[in-house]
Amino acid sequence: MTTGPLSDRERSYTLLLLVLVFTSSHVDRQIVAILAQPIKEAFALSDLQLGLLTGFAFALFYATLGMPMAIWADRGNRRNLIALAIALWSGMTVLCGLAQSYWQLLAARIGVGVGEAGSNPPSHSIIADLYPPEKRGTAMAIFAVGVNLGIMLGYLIGGWGNEWLDWRWAFVLAGAPGLLIALLVRLTIREPPRVVEQPVAPADADAARAKGGGTVSFWSVAATLWRSGILRHTVIAGTVVSFAGYATIAWIPTYFVRVHGQSTGEAGTVLALYLGIGGGIGTFLGGWVADRVAPFGEGWRAWVVTLSLLAYTPLAVLCYTAESARVASLAFLGPAVLGGVYIGVGFAIIQSQVSARMRAQAAAINLFILNIVGLGLGPTTVGAISDWMQPTRGTDSLRYGLLAMVAAIVWGAAHYFRAGQLLQRQTREMEVSATRVV
């Protein structure tokens, strides 16, 4: 039970533990990417089947169940929900190592998705209650670094676990630590009090009612996200960028193993450093820079992402067309660093545009769309394109699937640019309104 506001030390500890939770979720989610080739060989799978394993089958349950989990989070104890969720997904990851067929592995991966559905929305809501709007971009970016840390550890554990033992033991090594993290969450952090805060631009009466502490229906939250141009463009932008991003994370290890002849350990180590350390730095700096440039206009939060995506594009093309593994690897450092800039910034914009009792549901709706389209269809689409091109292009068919994802990056940059324009307009309107009141 909440007994009062968290101290600065408790707030920092809670944020760091939520980063650890997010890290664990991405270890267990992304480990399949580095193990895709040995799994393909073990069960004689097509690239489309691999894409379903890493994408749609997982994402469908993860995204869909995020909705009721978010309603629970907005009305109940968020800490307990997170602890239960991590225990479930960690146990199911261990079971992945025991699968004796593709369908058993697919069922275990669905179980991982069910567990992970209960983590992100309540985490977003807790962080929004811990940090005021002017610090929320940085806090969300710190939280989002868990993506990069998780990918790094997933690639290292998966790559070298497969080299030293086999792919089955790699799943066990990845999943077991999460059970300890679940205990830490349940026993060492408190449920923070909910901060009732005036939303930047209440979209309707339900938002105003939420300001007073009342609950808001799911459909009202969805309507708020749609009516607000800022929120609409932010969600669309994050969705199409994640479409490319999840596809890249799912297939880039296989690209280096299959096309450039690297071992899982070699590819996993390089990509872990790029996406883990480099990507973590980029993700954090995205939120940090967005908070620093916001005084020049709120639109610059979104425009920071636009610029990062435009820089990402040519380097990604160079990586996927390079004949040399060295050139491809060096070129991928750019997308690895820049690819996560949008995460913390987008989360922060959404949380700052809605009221306290809408936050977890707003996060869940955003994550539902992002994961169904991004995580669900991104890897699956690349696998389908690769299978389609394989009769004529051989192992190079995977290049074409990855190249198709670059178009989504440009599309997402355009939506972030528009969201920035609307944020600038909103800021000017609020300044004018404040002047009239004075």
Image (cartoon, rainbow, N blue to C red):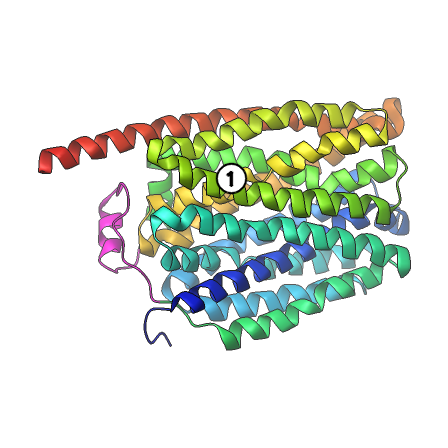
Q: Amino acid at mark 1?
A: Gly
Q: Is residue 56 above or below residue 304?
A: below
Left or right relative to 226: residue 346: right
Q: Please, what secondary structure does the residue beneath circle 1 have?
A: helix
The answer to whether 35 appears left or right of 285 in the picture is right
Image position of 102 (left or right of 199): right
Name the quadrant of the N terminus: bottom left
Q: Residue at point 41% right, 31% down?
A: 300
Span shown in magenta: 193-217
Q: Main secondary structure of the magenta part?
A: loop
Q: Is residue 215 magenta?
A: yes
Residue 215 in the image: state x and y as whole percent: 30, 59
Q: For residue 167, which quarter of the picture?
A: bottom right
The image shows a total of numbered marks equal to 1
- Kindly identify the residue that appears in the image at 72 percent across and 54 percent down: 154
Where does label 1 land, which residue?
286
Q: Nearer the viewer, residue 142 or 154?
A: 142
Q: Residue at x 40, y 35 (%)?
A: 293
In magenta segment, residue 423: no
User: Where's residue 200, x and y in %?
Assistant: 28, 43
Residue 319 spot, x, y in % from top left: 75, 28
Judge left or right: residue 242 versus residue 168: left
Residue in front for this viewpoint, 414 or 141: 141
Of the 4 image quadrants, the one containing the C terminus is top left
Q: Residues within 10 Å of mark 1 (few under 14, many from 20)?
A: many
Question: Taking 104 as reference, is 406 above or below it?
Answer: above
Residue at 80% x, 63% y: name it: 97
Q: Is residue 87 visible?
A: yes
